[in-house]
Image (tube, rainbow, N blue to C red):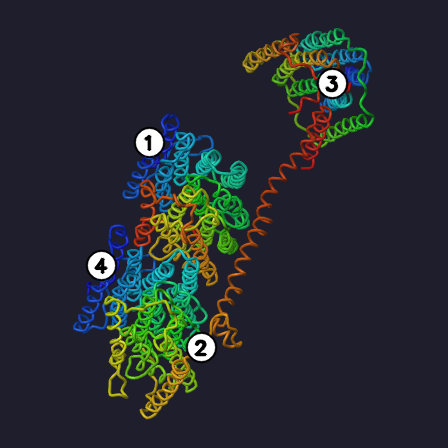
Amino acid sequence: MNLALLVPLLPLLGFLITGLGYKKLKHNQAGIIASMLVALSFIVSVTLFFILKSSGKDSATVTLFNWINIGSLNIPFAFLIDHLSLTMMMIVTGIGTLIHIYSIGYMHGDERVNSFFAQMNLFTFSMLLLVMGSNYLVLFIGWEGVGLCSYLLIGFWYKNPAYNYAARKAFIMNRIGDLGFILGILLLFFTFKSVTFSEVFQQAGALQTGSTTITLITLLLLVGALGKSAQIPLYTWLPDAMAGPTPVSALIHAATMVTAGIYMIARSSILYNLAPVTLEVIVVIGLATAIFAAIIGLKQNDIKKVLAYSTVSQLGYMFLALGLGAYSTAVFHVTTHAFFKALLFLGAGSVIHAMGGEQDIRKMGGLKSKLPVTYLTFLAATLAISGIPPFSGFFSKDMILSKAFEQNPMLYALALGGALITCFYMFRLLYLVFFGENRTANVHPHESPKVMTVPLMILAVLSTLGGFLNIPALLGGKLGFSSYLDSAVTSKSGEEMNHTTEMGLIALSLVLLAIVIYWAYNTFVKKAEVPAGDEVQLPAFQKAVANKFYVDELYRAVFEKPLASLSVFLFKKVESLILDPAVNNIGRGTAVLGALTRKLQRGNISFYLFAMVAGILLFIVFILII
Amino acid sequence: MILLILLLIPFISGLAVAFFKGTQAARTFAVASAILNLVITIFVLVNPVSEGYSAEWIGFMNIQFNLATDGISLVMILLTNLLFPFVILAGWGRSQRNVPMLNSLILLTQAALNGVFMAQNAFLFYVFWELALIPVYFILLVWGGDDRKSITLRFFIYTLAGSLFLLFGIIYLYQLTPGSHTTDFSAFNQLQIPEQTQTWLFWILFVAFAIKMPVFPFHTWQPPTYKMASTQGAMILAGVMTKMGIYGALRFLFPIVPLGVQFWQPVVIILGLIGVIYASVIAFKHTNLKTMIAYSSMAHISLMAAAMFVANEYAVKGLLFQVMSHGITIAALFYLACLVKEKTGSTEFHQLGGLKNKAPIFAILFLIAVLGSIALPLTAGFVGEFLMIAGLFQQSFWYALFGGLTMILGAIYMLYAYQRVMLGGQKPVFEKVTDLNRLDYIILIPLLVLIIGLGVFPQPVFDMIKIAGSALTMAH
Amino acid sequence: MKDITSAIQIIPLEHYILLCVTLFSIGLLGILFRRNTIIILMSIELMLNSVNLLVAAFSAYHSDPAGQVFVFFIMIVAAAEVAVGLSILVMMKRNVDSVDINLLNRLKW
Amino acid sequence: MVFLFYLLSAVMVISGLFVVFSRSPINSVLSLIVCFIAMAGHYILLNSQFLAVVHLIVYTGAIMVLFLFVIMLLNLNRATIPQKTSMTRVAAVVAGGLFFLVMVAATRLTFEIHPRYPFSSKIGLVSEVGKALFHEFLLPFEVSSVLFISAMIGAMIFGKKDKESLPQPPPKEGA
């Protein structure tokens, strides 16, 4: 089991090699080294998977050293290998490898390519710490580490101030969540006297369901998850995070990092099961985010922004699943989402690459014939995300929907509505980019090199077939993925839906999806409508959607501006007008007092004598009185 | 005896170096002395000395010259002697006036600081406390930047005024001791002072420390002083001298006036938390790198003050750990700020930007120091702040929440600073800017390695302060 | 001689004190009242002597020769003081051609 | 003999007042001499012959003559010095009177009947004082000679008419 140490150490090694040797490494060397190490890490993860399987145990802990040990606070630097973390490890390293390889092609020729791969490797390392940590604090190390790497990589092209701003925004939004997270960890520690997963979960059973403490703990942890997984109200950083290179968006802001919140809640499933209030909050937030982000996605014209909002929306679905107590379903959706969203982003990257850096879908079109591989893979991913069988997204999304139906048909209706919107904007994107005429004359798109297309193909296969990991009973499967996770994640068992209803629901959603796709086809291919340019005045609602409901502006007005003016106020008024003068005036007062008493010292001896006599008199009187 | 050596090496070599003629000779000698002291300090850490050093001093007042160490002072001494070689090195290769005198003053400061942290006698403590101020005063006055005269004067008088209260407190305690009076800490600690007295005596003793730290609202001397100070001055002031306040408070308040501490605890914690938010918010809109670092230092110290008064095990250990980590981080930050100034001629944000284009390694090291300052996990700052917030949490959720805001606010202003200095397009003015040279590596790499190293392996420091923490919580 | 010593014992010590206080007050009054430096010097002598007398009286009433010695020392100091004081006076007269004490107001600082 | 005490006292007080209030310094000096002679009488009443003699020699003989010399040499007798303003004079009288009152009050308050020490007729004699002086107070006695020398040197330096070594007198003002 000590092999597990290699999993995070290999990317760390890669970080050190590419980071320290960044002046020496030439051309693609850094990319190759980084990719190889992550690939090795993936191989080790897979090996671990089989070792664990053959050992017959559910989990294993590997302790590295004692990190902090004070009083009852004992935090080992240890890794927990169980079914959940193995799943995440394989996703992170597997998808990570593909994206690393893809990046070799994508980042080819960038002057800071070595630095890029160093940061990517550091990210992989942090993400592995996050998913492998055996206690909340090691998880937190990774949690913040991925935040840092995301900061670095969003601002990778640091010469652009807007990118830097986006990077800072991402980091700070994450930090807001992190504060909640760390307070949650502390409350957890002071409740259970431990932050190690196994010990906490063991003791958690003693707590009453719905008690204040457990609700508070879960809510605080949830705040962290909201920040990291870009849920309302802390989601605005993720669309801006698209400032980074596209592979970064694929790896960090779609496939892995943003799912950390889902992982954390799934990991804490025992706690969350005890807090029904929190679960309800999660359902509300998840559903709201899913629909809200999907609506915004309808009107975005930047290819990466569309994908970003779709990510936010899909994360909302995962939260919905979590809130419904279907943790393994959520993780399953994480997995399939990782496949198809990574594919979408990489495909988008390929398109951008081909278009020479152009990201506006209004200026694309007709790329189907120019970029056949990209088109096909992109199509697979679009079908997957829309939930068309047998693509992977269908399985995971349908499971979430049916869980929602079990809980409340209303939830189901809303979730389905969100799914339809998703389907619409995804096909809108697909049609605008690949169908119709090329809308920019002087660009000559060309298919990306093999090093980029091969990962696309692999991911396309995964997106297509990934769903078969978890075939529902309805289709004669036995939920292999979910039951694999059951040892690590305690899902709430709802009553089994009868198959007829389920069948009906699937049929309903498929019909609706077909209508939506046709509608999109009608609008964007047949009528060849192109979204209006920025200068065109839109109707009020559409304008609001196009401007992302002005949430950024709202935040700026409510938080940023007041903080800035408070800062100025404190410095200009409190510091410079009250505190500083207060001190200076004490000094000045002394000087004034000196100037006053100086007048007494005017050198008149008879005055001195008077003063002396008066003093002696007072003195004697004083003695007499006392 | 070895403790006395720790004190005497910088003292004697400080006096000696003043008579050197050659610039480089003086610097080499000073660094050698500081490194020797560091080696001895490490030796002391590895082989703890149980008995201190004691000698007759002022016989008729029954005041002894006695030195000893415990966990708290070990941390402080280690920090002091760790930073001073770098402080002295920071002057290398730079044109400075009267180098022998400067190095002499730096070494004398070191001696006085060592004395403060080892004194077992309130009077001796006070003597060293004031003694440390004198060389620093001259370092600031002679080698400082713009407007140094008035700023230094204010700093000097401000701290001196605080010390006056301390002296009064010490004399008051002295005459309370039974029998032939004494100023030994051990005698002070055994005093049973009535609660009424403790409540006012607390402030008498605390004011000096509060000014030194500084705690809101006693901080107004600090930002201009740090801004004006030379690199070495700022490193000493921010790195070590602020810790004198913390050390003093730990040494005086908790054992001697525990009831006073109990009485004023909420007030001071809230003052500390106000300081955290106040300083962070001000830093947010500051336009000068050095002032911003000064406010960030104040924010961290305020959190430390709050944690100190929570006085549970986590808070105190976190505090002592943070003493180390903050000292190292802030020294590195000030050195980096000095490099910025050297390379560009300014620390005003509106004149800076895009340094990363020309000096990528500089930018990376700067970023690491910034990350240490904003308490990213696996840097030393995180361990300290996490434990302090844990301590605050044990007292009250709200304390922890407001203390924890430093995580967010710190990230806001420090990353803003990083962005304004390093990121952005290349400015034509900075065409000739070069990356770091070997000396910069010698100073920065060890400091940054320590920042990360302590973040990954904090346990040795905790083992070192194990004794201290238990003593404190007992006194409380 | 016997007469004197016995008579002394009839006079209460309080009367000596009153006398000396009176003389001292007269001297003080002189210092405050006059501007002529030489008169002020004389008033100082008067005050010194009033104290001398009191010390001598206490010494006699307490049978302690130390008091007598102190009177002697005070006289020495007084003599020295007068010597210096008068020379200052001479200087003053020579330099500012007056012995008005108010002209000495440059003694400040 | 008791009568003698009160007589001498009356002489002292009256001559003391003359010292303060007489217009001409010469009169003041002469009244002071009278006052001192009366004081010598008091010393004799206290059986302190040694002090009486020393007092006569030092004060009446030396110091007062010195005063006279100075007054005559500097021709100070023509009182050119204006009196103080009436306001300050009233203040001076009030202050002096207050002082007197307070002191009297103090003596009255602090009186206590303490046992009379056995009266020794001998302590004021020359031999007794001499013993005390040369045994217990030998060192102060010797040190006082240093004081004297320094006083003499000081007086001489002040009196030296070396204008160059002295700061120039500031321009005359007021007077």
Q: Amino acid at mark 1?
A: Phe
Q: Give the label on residue A295, or none.
A: 2
Q: Chain of mark 4?
A: A
For the residues labelled 4 and 2, the Cα–Cα distance comes to 42 Å
Q: Chain of mark 3?
A: C
Q: Name the residue tied to disc 3.
A: C40
Q: Looking at the rendering, in which quadrant would you find the N terminus of chain A?
A: bottom left
- Callout 3: SS: helix
- Callout 2: SS: helix
Q: Amino acid at mark 3?
A: Ile
Q: Amino acid at mark 4?
A: Ile
Question: Do badges 4 and 1 share one subunit?
Answer: no
Marks 4, 1: nearer the viewer? 4
Q: Give the label on residue B29, or none.
A: 1
| Residue placed furthest toward the bottom | A500
Where B406 sits versus B107, above or below? below
Q: Position of residue B191 (x, y in %)?
A: 47, 45
Q: Name the residue tied to disc 4.
A: A33
